[in-house]
Image (cartoon, rainbow, N blue to C red):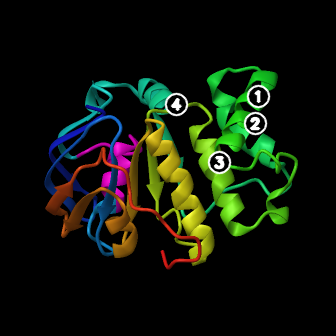
Amino acid sequence: MIVDLRQVTKTYADQVQALRGVDLAVEGGELLAIVGPSGSGKSTMLHLIGTLDRPTTGTVRIAGYDVAELSDRELSALRGRTLGFVFQQFHLAPGVSALDNVADGLLYTGTPLRVRRERAAAALERVGLGHRLAHRPNQLSGGEQQRVAVARAVAGDPPLLLADEPTGNLDSSAGAEVLGVLRDLHAAGTTIAIITHDAEIAEWCPRQVRVRDGQIVDDHGDGTSAPAEITKGART
């Protein structure tokens, strides 16, 4: 089991209770959507699963490790080898090539520059951008920039990818391209959790976890099944 949340709560300093006794188990190789409206608690779940925050009460285990038992350095190491992140904003360095934007994502692994660039080139090939290695972000479309961001997230071959509204800044055609990349990564064995408020993207995922008012109100589907086909140009 790669994600295991048990009776997790999260209360912030202003006494806002973002999560209320959440139980969630995700097996390796699943593709799921964590879906809900703004303020539902889904982003808080992302932060806890991504080890970017710690629960107020309850247990969060990622890849078998109880995050409460790890030091900040150990958490960083777990994050570095286990997790990849894709956000709605691309967060690409504007004057840097696609190759080095991806390679820089491996900067803190201690890997030599030549090896980082080799892994970056392989990751860009995986997302269909092997012909865009030298292009800077302003020379790429929005969909291509997000695919660079996906390549950066998977360059270290993490078993778990967290995608927060990955098509939120894209038109329908570019969004379909990004979902196609995620589908291929899932088929290759990567566990993917997509955080979204978009019902259509949620339905595209073979498992949907619906969150409201800090609680999981519905959890159905088989996350190991293949997602539906996305037609380029279809609304996403």
The residue identified by callout 1 is: 118
Badge 2 marks a residue whose secondary structure is helix
Identity of the amino acid at label 2? Ala
Tag 3 and tag 2, C-beta contact below 8 Å:
no
Q: Residue 121: which numbered mark, if any? A: 2
The residue identified by callout 3 is: 127
As displayed, is residue 219 above or below residue 212?
above
Percent across and percent down for residue 224 are: 30, 44
Q: Left of 202 or right of it: where is 96?
A: right
The residue identified by callout 4 is: 80
Distance, label 4 to label 1, CA atoms, is 18 Å
Q: Earlier in the sequence, mark 1 or mark 3?
A: 1
Distance, label 1 to label 3, CA atoms, is 15 Å
Q: Earlier in the sequence, mark 4 or mark 2?
A: 4
Identity of the amino acid at label 1? Glu
Q: In this rendering, which labeled residue sits more in front, label 3 or label 4?
A: 3
Residue at (50, 27) in percent of width and height: 81
- Which region is colored magenta? 43-55
Q: Earlier in the sequence, mark 4 or mark 1?
A: 4
